[in-house]
Amino acid sequence: MSSNTFGTLFRFTTFGESHGPATGCVVDGVPPRIELDEADIQRWLDRRRPGRSRFTTQRREPDRARILSGVFEGRTTGTPVGILIENVDARPRDYSTIKDKFRPGHADFTYWAKYGIRDYRGGGRASARETATRVAAGGVARKVLDALTEGSVSIRGALVQLGPHPVERERWDWEAVEENPFWCPDRAAAERWEGYLDEVRRRGSSCGAVIELAASGVPAGLGAPVYGKLDAELAAALMSINAVKGVEIGAGFGAAALSGEVNADEMRIEDGRPVFLANNAGGVLGGISTGQDLVARFAVKPTSSIVTPRRTVTIDGTETEISTKGRHDPCVGIRAVPVGEAMMASVLADQLLRHRAQCG
Amino acid sequence: MSSNTFGTLFRFTTFGESHGPATGCVVDGVPPRIELDEADIQRWLDRRRPGRSRFTTQRREPDRARILSGVFEGRTTGTPVGILIENVDARPRDYSTIKDKFRPGHADFTYWAKYGIRDYRGGGRASARETATRVAAGGVARKVLDALTEGSVSIRGALVQLGPHPVERERWDWEAVEENPFWCPDRAAAERWEGYLDEVRRRGSSCGAVIELAASGVPAGLGAPVYGKLDAELAAALMSINAVKGVEIGAGFGAAALSGEVNADEMRIEDGRPVFLANNAGGVLGGISTGQDLVARFAVKPTSSIVTPRRTVTIDGTETEISTKGRHDPCVGIRAVPVGEAMMASVLADQLLRHRAQCG
Amino acid sequence: MSSNTFGTLFRFTTFGESHGPATGCVVDGVPPRIELDEADIQRWLDRRRPGRSRFTTQRREPDRARILSGVFEGRTTGTPVGILIENVDARPRDYSTIKDKFRPGHADFTYWAKYGIRDYRGGGRASARETATRVAAGGVARKVLDALTEGSVSIRGALVQLGPHPVERERWDWEAVEENPFWCPDRAAAERWEGYLDEVRRRGSSCGAVIELAASGVPAGLGAPVYGKLDAELAAALMSINAVKGVEIGAGFGAAALSGEVNADEMRIEDGRPVFLANNAGGVLGGISTGQDLVARFAVKPTSSIVTPRRTVTIDGTETEISTKGRHDPCVGIRAVPVGEAMMASVLADQLLRHRAQCG
Amino acid sequence: MSSNTFGTLFRFTTFGESHGPATGCVVDGVPPRIELDEADIQRWLDRRRPGRSRFTTQRREPDRARILSGVFEGRTTGTPVGILIENVDARPRDYSTIKDKFRPGHADFTYWAKYGIRDYRGGGRASARETATRVAAGGVARKVLDALTEGSVSIRGALVQLGPHPVERERWDWEAVEENPFWCPDRAAAERWEGYLDEVRRRGSSCGAVIELAASGVPAGLGAPVYGKLDAELAAALMSINAVKGVEIGAGFGAAALSGEVNADEMRIEDGRPVFLANNAGGVLGGISTGQDLVARFAVKPTSSIVTPRRTVTIDGTETEISTKGRHDPCVGIRAVPVGEAMMASVLADQLLRHRAQCG
């Protein structure tokens, strides 16, 4: 994994800035003869698309994915799949107010420190807009997983905490996830979150979130120890998403407080096959999948672009303030759900190909 | 990062099983003309060595690192540094009791599921013994960092939670870390932990831990967005350590509950240079270092090898029990401190070289 | 180097089929703040463009390169440079005559054997059309070389053999190269080649060629031994060009027949600096540049698409014949000149960044 | 392929200098459950070993390969195979005569130019001694090929030209290769070569050679277009061997002089399967194997270490002469035969795993 390329065998390279003419990705390593068309990608992009509810940015991007290569007569050919997403609503507006200021919590200062130049329009390359191309690549990853596991792998994500407010696990219902604007699995929580988030926005503030991902039907044996472990690569994949500050697998940080007896998932035989009596491991032992659900959580910090004025400095070393008035999500964690799913799908597709290579 | 090689430019490949003749690593990409001898590696290995206190395994491994290549007349030559660590105390004992059983919480089942064969002696490749080679490579990484930053980068680690018992941050003293067997920065906590851990071991149980790492003096601008972000690679590096279940940067999971105003670190000018008024970011914005301390935490699950009998199954599908009587650490988190430091050093050395390549 | 990505630090990924909507490339690792615009790419694409003379294919492709990312206000930003080249003259014609036949000398059979599916329109991914994206990436590489060596590196190519007819080295004139349709450095040879190639085409045949590349001003010290040697990577780069069957460096195959005294280039001091008295090494010793001209030659086989009918078989195992009537170059070696230059530029840019990383 | 690691999935990393304590390699990506022991490696090392005849160096190296990891109870486990070869005959002699001089034709000057430091003892890392570790890795590659193709792939090499004296192809007999000290397939030529090479040595000179490699039984479909083509990777693999100056596939440079009709191998059906009527392609079309013999040739320059004095310079810029009196091969091309075979085996093993990953 390096710079703008993700993965080793199922591998995608992305490019594009927030306000450039287009973003896109090149997906390489795709097995041949898999059915793939633009709708297979578009359905996931639509989940991430801005403006789905009043809780996400009102930037109007259709996010239309166009396949430029690698597909012939509806099936993949084994050559790289080029995907282009044009930026439509990249408004040529006045950037003079932010051009020379480092927005706190953003990558403005660090890009400038690193490169000595930065595309300040809408965050440039550091914008969450980049995640559209990940979701597109993730759509291809899902097709690869489907084809290679005969549809056994299913990946789902849900918001399990908004600001300081977690869901209650006993009320978890995967169907609820599709019914509210938060991808929340707890209907009661979702209701309360509406009021909470309206209030956050009214205050000119923002909040963070925790997302949980679960992949079921993952075959046992996926993972490339010791530096390409399934959980290690998943951690990198999720941490690479904008604004993510933490990743955990299974019992996660909570595992530190468990006793050895409680933590290590015991095994029994059921229907002639080994089963686990718990899943504190989150589906990974020694960096290799156990066959149980692969469970990961990641934490997203609050949106840094807020209306409340904040102290900052300019490129030439002057102290100043900044207040962001753009079309921003009050909680970027919400739209991170489909992005997390896409990254998990990509990690699994990659590990599946690596497993095939070494173990047949 | 893939399978048994870590890093892209500062890059090391490790090999070796717990009870084979030797483990070792090959460190490639090392800049030339850096002073390096075996003592530079040994001092870090000694921190990780078993048997330093009654709280770590009593396996007697001198862990002597021997440099086989890449150093000439006391300085690196730019060619790969081969390092060998012989296994001395790999006792040829009777494995018949564990040969066919999957130890819960260990990688026994998953290695078998993946490869259809496993070296069951002491966990084979999945043993924490592999971390000795990481620490050796980390010793080289520290020399590289020293040479390239004129000694500005300093990396330290501490245990901040043992089982359910965290340290108190107001009592934090880095000097305390070197004075107790836990690398605990809180003297009062360290004292209480002794009793707690004795009790855990007496019960035939084990416990987990949380480690905090901090690198100070990191230049701003290190990181390779968007898939080779500094925090993403650090997350992978730490998650790849045995028994790790969670990684967080700066405010980490706690960031989800903060407001946008509190979370985004404001900036001012001090002595003509931009400074941050807080470090919720943990020293990383947009995957690039800010110049503040790089702060990460990782959670280690309880040792899976415990005396208390646990239910499990055998390779041929029989239900059984297992109880581990070997020479095991009651909390593997303790010895994970120097390992975490080594991985952070390696990630930084790698990012430093990558930055040099692109930005001069 | 793997599948559709070339290079390690200066690295480009290409996509696109001969008759798909577009081809393109993503160039990653580009240092920031280098002046770059579309003209810097277009000038090299224009050299490779079909239809420049009667000796190249009459397909009418403007080969317009459009930069989609990575450049801001005329300078590179350090983020990936996405480049798109639309296929304009991809005629939706009748492929029924070649759809099921394997054209001898082409990759039809092997793509089908590998992938079980193939885009038969104009050779699909195996078409020499892919080389347009290499030339575009090479244009970026040249800018990187210029910026990092202050313009010292100059890369030139010439056709030194057309069919069985070599140039005479004593008549070599680099200026002649730009004056004839063959990039031939020997004016007399160029004249004779016209008649020869007209005759080849009249016969419905084709011919091969040998191209020589020379980079002057290459600093000593570039190369990544022992598997990333400058000459090894150059060999891979050139051999990866369509229809290439051989690569040699300096004295090349001829070196086998030299004596040790003649072959090893002696050294003297001139103006206080070491110089070589000959260049049988072609500018590389031990995989590292010597500072002399980097000299490579590569052989291109005759165009496989010819009018003369050839025996072949169909996908379903029937014996048949095939005769190609398309718009083909009688000697693909001619247009391989700018492609070879682009690959040499890319190899050098990559090695330069790798050298900076390790040696500062 | 980068620096000291070869391959992508079947991947080996080597380390070690000519006169250091040991050289070795770590072979990663090896499929599990393949029978492997030290004899499988030793048999190939013995072919490369110095001192087999009066025509190779008299340095006395037993070249004993010791497997340190990755094998359990006689079978591979899927974890990295560490192999160590100790340097036994690395004489601690007086280097004062060569310490400061750049030997013409050697990498002395370029290593110094690149790294500013060099291990001058016996050429250090640039010594052909490094090829022992390649041959060891190649031994593992052969076992992988055997296991995955059920023994169908057979790789052989032969010297087809010594100095200016080629073999005659009509006298080619593979059995002869094992009967003379040159790996020469032409008994009459081998006889004449003895006198020729004795004379070369008597004169204090040296000569070059051309080696031909052929792999039969390679399945159609191996290769990773467009930058990981089978022939491109083979070219890099062979060019990375010490002293190699040229590589060609099939008809190679000769293809440039053929007509399109002659060059493109026609196809027919035999026993219901497609066959080719010639093999100018050398078994590769579009970078993918055709199923025909994979045929490559590479040129090795004359040994640079000769008794005849040559002009050179010192590190501090003084003009001087050098004459090498060590234990050198008069033609390093001879011992390059098993090295070439090992590299071809490694390239094929790697491509086989890559093909499995993408195409199942």
Image (cartoon, coloured by chain):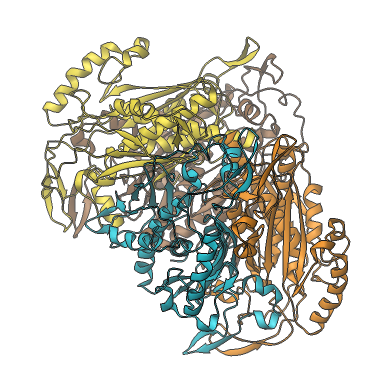
Chain colours: A orange, B cyan, C brown, D yellow
Tell me, yes or no, if residue C34 can be seen here: no
Q: Quadrant of the N terminus of chain D?
A: top left
Left or right: C261 in relation to C330: left
C271, D155: nearer the viewer:
D155
Q: Residue furthest front?
A: B202
| Residue that appears at 33% across and 59% down | B41
Q: Quadrant of the C terminus of chain D?
A: top right
Image x and y of residue D355, in percent: 58, 33
C218, B325: nearer the viewer:
B325
Q: In the figure, A260 relative to B3: above or below? A: below
Left or right: C318 in relation to D240: right
Q: Quadrant of residue A62?
A: bottom right
Q: Quadrant of residue A359?
A: top right
Q: In the figure, A269 relative to D109: above or below? A: above
Tell me, yes or no, if residue B245 can be seen here: yes
Image x and y of residue A349, in percent: 66, 45
| Residue that appears at 70% across and 55% down | A295
Left or right: B42 in relation to A40: left
Q: In the figure, A182 relative to D136: above or below? A: below
Left or right: A157 in relation to B182: right
B304, B157: nearer the viewer:
B304
Image x and y of residue C269, in percent: 17, 54
Image x and y of residue B51, in percent: 39, 59
User: In this figure, what is the number of numbered marks?
Assistant: 0
A249, B309: nearer the viewer:
B309
